[in-house]
Image (tube, rainbow, N blue to C red):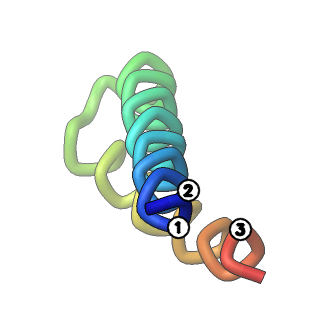
Amino acid sequence: MEDFKEDIKFILVVIFFSILIFFMGLFATNSIKHSIFLISFILSFLLPMLII
C-alpha cells in the first residue's frame, strides 16, 4: 500500500510539471503543437532522473 501511495504522488508530480510546462510553452510560443513537443522533450530527460 505504501508503494502505491508513492506511485500516485510521483504520477501527480509528473502531471503537474507537464501542465506547468505546457502553459509556459503555450505562453512563450502561442502554439499548442510546440507546447506538446516541449513537454515530451523535457519529460524524456526528467523521467529517467526521477526514476533513478
List x then y, in percent, for residue 24.
50, 24
Asked if 37 appears above or below 15 in the picture, the reply is: below
How many angstroms separate mark 2 from mark 3 (CA)? Answer: 12 Å
Q: Which residue is mark 3?
A: 50
Viewer-closest of 12 and 3 = 3
List x then y, in percent, for residue 48.
67, 81
List x then y, in percent, for residue 31.
26, 34
Tag 2 near tag 1, CB within 8 Å: yes
- Frontmost of labels 2 and 3 is 2
Q: Secondary structure at mark 3?
A: helix
Viewer-closest of 33 and 21 = 21
Viewer-closest of 1 and 49 = 1
The local crowd at label 1, few if under 14, some if 14 to 19, many if 20 or more residues have their Cα within 10 Å, is few
Q: Which residue is mark 1?
A: 3
Q: Which residue is mark 2?
A: 6
The local crowd at label 3, few if under 14, some if 14 to 19, many if 20 or more residues have their Cα within 10 Å, is few
Which numbered disc covers residue 39?
Answer: none
Q: Residue furthest left?
A: 32
Asked if 4 appears above or below 51 in the picture, the reply is: above
Q: Secondary structure at mark 2?
A: helix
Three-letter amino acid code at the position of disc 1: Asp
Q: Residue at x 47, y 51 (%)?
A: 5
The local crowd at label 2, few if under 14, some if 14 to 19, many if 20 or more residues have their Cα within 10 Å, is few
- Frontmost of labels 3 and 1 is 1
How many angstroms separate mark 2 from mark 1 (CA)? Answer: 5 Å
Q: Secondary structure at mark 1?
A: helix
Lower position in the chain sequence, tag 3 or tag 1: 1
Give the quadrant of residue 45: bottom right
Three-letter amino acid code at the position of disc 2: Glu
Lower position in the chain sequence, tag 2 or tag 3: 2
Three-letter amino acid code at the position of disc 3: Leu
Q: Residue at x 39, y 43 (%)?
A: 15
